[in-house]
Image: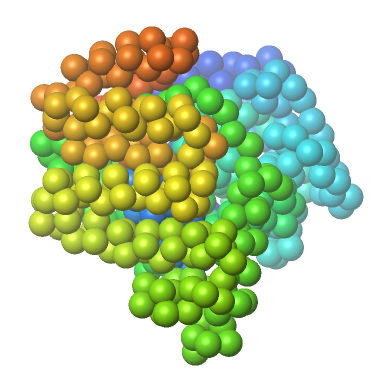
């Protein structure tokens, strides 16, 4: 991808300018010389959890928490990379890939998959700085993958289609890192649009954009409980879904993924499934229906209906898919008794991380205060709360945007692909 090919310019906030300058200085101090700086956003998912790897429907949005990657090309086949978040350096040879089992695998994996896809480059020096909380369910890994991918391609001024880049980054996480994730996170990090939710069909990749209602805000509540999904319960859930498809494919014609299974077929043949497999399938089948219904509710500006669908989604994730945790359940419980809250649910892979909440605009200050104090009182943990602004306000802290090149000229600004 060449972010400077057809840019749409937007004024960067002073905070973004300061961060850009700080990262460039760190790069000069570490490696010497100039760099190009790229960023890609994390994401929330309003509804549609664990449906993407079942070829289903999702409704994510890019958020204004980014991973930034500074890069400069080198003349050899080695990649040197430094993470400010871990205060660690790593290096790897493009001709001899070797997973290390740490954060650098996301960068190395993207580089290797780019090479396998026909994109060739010598080497690079890279510096990574991310403000997407790790293990929070806001997709810090996809933000890193996409930013690293764009940065590596830029060393050779190589264009890449955003959909293709999302596929490449997903392959890196599936095949190199070992997490069998779907396409959602990488796709929205590449293709998010300011002020909009993205309605995505994870099989065809057909997508459309739904505006966030102007009289509502999206609020993220971080439980501060971390999760790790690579090779763990996430992969187990995916295997259970695959087993459900295998067991039912002999009686349901054309069944290749749970996306193809209707609620009626699932109930008709549920006796063919072990209890746990049936529950996993019931979540996915029901969640796909809820995403479609949520899109209709947003089109009609029916936030009450949307809230009920979010509640049903969280209950299904808790009871059928069993990926919630006490802290997530508590955060949702606390939100649901605050006036002005339309809906609340966990977001992300689960086992910790964040909830996403749809709240009336004028109720946000009271919500943030009540949730923070009540959650700390019950758990002893101080949560982080991120509040959106109006989709018409391009200076908002939570204003959604896609992958960007940050220019170093005097009129520094974000260039949105």
Front position in the image: 176 or 293: 293
Q: Quadrant of residue 180?
A: bottom right
In depth, the one of 377 and 76 nearer the eye is 377
Residue 150 against residue 160 in the figure, above or below: above
Please tell me which residue is depicted at 38% across the width and 10% down the height of the picture.
377
Q: Residue furthest right?
A: 96
Count of all numbered marks drawn on residues in the image: 0
Question: Residue 42, image x and y in percent?
Answer: 46, 38
Residue 251 seen in render = yes
Q: Residue at x 37, y 59 (%)?
A: 287
Between 225 and 274, which is closer to the camera in this rendering? 274
- Going 26% across and 13% down the picture, which residue do you hit? 369
- Compared to residue 256, the image places residue 243 above or below, namely above
Observer able to see residue 52: no
* Image point (33%, 14%), residue name: 374
**Left/right of residue 406 with respect to residue 114 in the rendered view:** left
**Scheme of image coloration:** rainbow
Of residue 109 and residue 267, the one placed in the foreground of this image is 267
Residue 145 figure quarter: top right
Residue 362 position within the rendered picture, expressed as x and y whole percent measured from the top left: 11, 24
Asked whether, in this view, residue 229 is left or right of residue 90, the answer is: left
Percent across and percent down for residue 360 are 14, 32
* Residue 380 drawn at (x, y percent): 47, 10
């Amino acid at each position: 991808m060449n972010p400077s090919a057809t840019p749409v310019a937007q004024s960067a906030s002073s905070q973004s300018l300061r961060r850009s300058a700080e990262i460039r200085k760190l790069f000069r101090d570490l490696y010497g010389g100039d760099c190009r700086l790229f960023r890609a956003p994390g994401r929330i998912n309003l509804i549609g959890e664990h449906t993407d790897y079942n070829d289903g429907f999702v409704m994510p949005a890019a958020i204004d928490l980014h991973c930034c990657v500074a890069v400069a090309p080198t003349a050899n086949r080695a990649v040197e990379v430094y993470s400010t978040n871990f205060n660690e350096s790593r290096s790897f040879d493009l001709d001899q890939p070797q997973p290390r089992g740490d954060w650098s695998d996301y960068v190395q994996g993207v580089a290797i998959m780019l090479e396998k896809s026909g994109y060739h480059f010598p080497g690079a020096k890279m510096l990574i700085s991310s403000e997407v909380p790790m293990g929070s369910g806001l997709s810090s890994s996809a933000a890193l993958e996409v930013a690293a991918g764009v940065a590596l391609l830029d060393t050779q001024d190589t264009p890449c289609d955003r959909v293709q880049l999302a596929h490449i980054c997903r392959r890196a996480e599936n095949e190199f890192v070992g997490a069998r994730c779907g396409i959602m996170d990488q796709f929205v990090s590449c293709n998010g649009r300011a002020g909009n939710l993205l309605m995505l069909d994870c099989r065809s990749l057909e997508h459309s954009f739904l505006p966030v209602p102007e009289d509502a805000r999206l609020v993220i509540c971080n439980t501060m409980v971390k999760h790790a999904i690579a090779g763990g319960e996430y992969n187990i859930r995916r295997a259970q879904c695959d087993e459900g498809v295998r067991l039912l494919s002999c009686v349901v014609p054309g069944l290749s993924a749970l996306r193809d299974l209707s609620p009626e077929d699932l109930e008709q043949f549920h006796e063919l499934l072990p209890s746990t497999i049936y529950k996993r399938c019931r979540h996915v089948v029901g969640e796909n229906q809820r995403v479609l219904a949520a899109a209709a509710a947003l089109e009609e500006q029916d936030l009450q209906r949307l809230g009920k669908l979010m509640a049903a989604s969280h209950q299904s994730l808790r009871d059928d898919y069993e990926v919630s945790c006490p802290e997530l359940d508590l955060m949702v419980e606390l939100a649901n008794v605050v006036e002005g809250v339309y809906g609340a649910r966990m977001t992300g892979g689960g086992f910790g991380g964040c909830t996403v909440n749809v709240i009336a605009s004028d109720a946000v200050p009271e919500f943030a205060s009540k949730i923070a104090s009540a959650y700390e009182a019950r758990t002893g943990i101080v949560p982080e709360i991120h509040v959106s602004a109006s989709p018409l306000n391009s200076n908002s802290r939570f204003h959604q945007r896609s992958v960007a090149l940050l220019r170093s000229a005097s009129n520094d600004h974000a260039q949105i692909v």
